[in-house]
Amino acid sequence: MIKSKNSRIGDWIIVCICIILILLCLLPILNVLARSLSSSEALIKNEVMLWPKGWNLDAYETVLGDPKYVRSLIWTAILTIICTIASLFMTTICAYPLIFKELKGRKIINTIIIFTMYFNAGTIPNYLLLKELSMLDRPIVLILPGVLSVFNMIIMRSFFYGIPDSLRESAEIDGASYFKILIKVYLPLSKPVMATLALFYAVGRWNGFSDALMYMNERKWHPIQLLLYNILNNFTSVEVATKEGFSSPGLSETLKAATVMFATIPILLVYPWLQRYFIAGATLGAIKE
């Protein structure tokens, strides 16, 4: 089928819009990368845009040579893996029972769960609750409170709805239990949505720092993003930069850029492995309600 002239113009307009959006996302990353690889003198003179000037790896040597950066990165990676696995488990066991019409109180349970997505107690009550549970300054405070996302649970529940009932009924006729149906029927067919939600949970945990900022005083349990947050705030003053051993403002700027890249690149490397599942999982989850 030959496209009309107006259709081709529309395609080119869409392509141009996509290119602009890609550049808007890519250019800031390239700027930070260039700053992290540039000399302090070039940064002081504001000569760095998208290409490094005065190539050097001093900032990366400083980051990789400092135990607190490496320890924080390793801890964040472990925390992300634990939170992602725990969240996927909780999301699955929460979404799966809600697809059965014979579940008593299903509508009430759905309403209560969705209610928590729009309304919550607030920061102070949450803090007091976690304090009463003796969870403050413990690693579990970074895992348990955010272990389930209602929005992600709805996506998985909708995906389960899209799986033909005939498959479940066939398994029931063969004598399979509800748990076995989940393991043998639903989970093997749910790789796209599982990969999508895993990416959502992993990125959310990797980029999260507000919970650690409010609930965690022990520095050894600070994730990399909180460490980056503290660095970006601390290096705004020359006094703190000097105290940290970076008397040159340019070196401080280079270190900040290197730390940003240090915290960003690992999670960016995960996406290509899940890309083939991501689009399918994000779209198939809305087939049927």
Image (cartoon, rainbow, N blue to C red):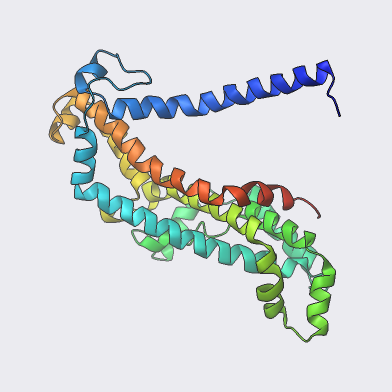
Q: Residue furthest bottom?
A: 175
Location of the C terminus (image quadrant): bottom right
Q: Residue furthest front?
A: 1
The correct choice, above or below, for 245 with respect to 163 in the image is: above
In depth, the one of 79 and 22 nearer the eye is 22
Quadrant housing residue 13: top right
Residue 288 visible: yes
Q: Residue at x 55, y 27 (%)?
A: 22
Residue 155 spot, x, y in % from top left: 69, 54
Q: Residue at x 36, y 18 (%)?
A: 49
In depth, the one of 190 and 288 nearer the eye is 190
Quadrant housing residue 243: top left
Residue 236 visible: no
Residue 283 spot, x, y in % from top left: 71, 47
Residue 23 spot, x, y in % from top left: 52, 24
Count up the numbered dots.
Answer: 0
Quadrant housing residue 74: bottom left
In depth, the one of 211 and 45 nearer the eye is 45
Residue 138 spot, x, y in % from top left: 35, 62
The correct choice, above or below, for 135 with respect to 35 in the image is: below
Q: Residue at x 72, y 60 (%)?
A: 157
Location of the N terminus (image quadrant): top right
Left or right, 102 with respect to 123, comes to right
